[in-house]
Image (cartoon, rainbow, N blue to C red):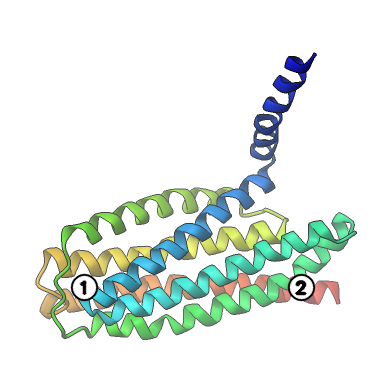
Amino acid sequence: MAKAEKKRVEKQPVKRLLAIWSDKVQRVFVSSTLSLIATVAFAGYNLFLWLTCGAAWNIGIAVYYVLLAGIRAHVLLSERRFRRADLSEEQREAIRKKIFLTQSGMLFCIDLALIVPISLMVMQEKEVNYSQIPAIATAAYTTYKIVISTCNFVKDRKERHWSVKIFKTLNFVDALVSVLSLQYILVMTFGEGVKDTMLTLCATTTFAIWAMLIAVSVFSLWKAIKERRKGS
């Protein structure tokens, strides 16, 4: 009898994990928690590169990733409060819709402020000597982010869960910014820095990616305002 009870208890965590993974919303929350950890780690890595290499781009992008992690943490903490509160799912969605406007506004502000580190990157005059390790690490992070976030962003465009919506948008934005980081490190590692023809190329591609970031955050903000007006 004791052995049967022990086996049942041992199987409970496995069943719980399978139940979470089978629920799309719970799966997004778990992956977003992992993304939060990865974002904080990548911010710390850029801070380390700034301390060792002295590139202004790295400290700027580290601050950006900290702010992006802050929005993720805000969504996760809000969901935790919802679980503890005695609210129906309709009440939770109504609150999520209001918070979505705040989160979208925060995302737009930090994407707009990204022009500062971008300008520092394009106008970089100091020679920065990265090893190949930062290039490989950034390439791995960028590849992972681009593949996962793009698939999810396109696949779940009609998702009605507001916390899931903002998570998808944050992941897509995160992936785009990681492309900027990869471009900068590759140019500084394997090229001759941001100058001459490379300056024009970097400025063009960087502005195009930044414009895409602004478009994504503006669309998210517009959608939040539109839904808020419907509810009022």
Q: Quadrant of the N terminus?
A: top right
Secondary structure of the residue carrying tag 2 is helix
Circle 2: is it few (<14), some (14-19), or many (20+) Cα within 10 Å? some
- Mark 2 or 1: in front is 2
Q: Which residue is drawn at 48% across and 65% down?
A: 173
> Residue under circle 2?
98
Q: In which quarter of the image is the C terminus?
A: bottom right
Q: In this view, does 173 lie to the left or right of 230?
A: left
Q: Is residue 189 left or right of residue 213?
A: left
Task: Work out whether residue 209 or residue 127 is closer to the camera in this orientation and state it.
Answer: 127
- Per the model, the C-alpha gap separating discs 2 and 1 is 41 Å
Q: Which amino acid, by three-letter code, is at mark 2?
A: Lys
Q: Which mark is residue 201?
A: 1
Q: Which amino acid, by three-letter code, is at mark 1?
A: Leu
Question: Relative to 132, does residue 148 appear above or below in the rendering?
Answer: above
Q: In this view, does 97 lie to the left or right of 63?
A: right
Question: Relative to 194, does residue 80 appear above or below in the rendering?
Answer: above
Q: Which residue lies furthest to the top in this view?
A: 1
- Image quadrant assignment for residue 119: bottom left
Question: Relative to 56, does residue 140 appear above or below in the rendering?
Answer: above
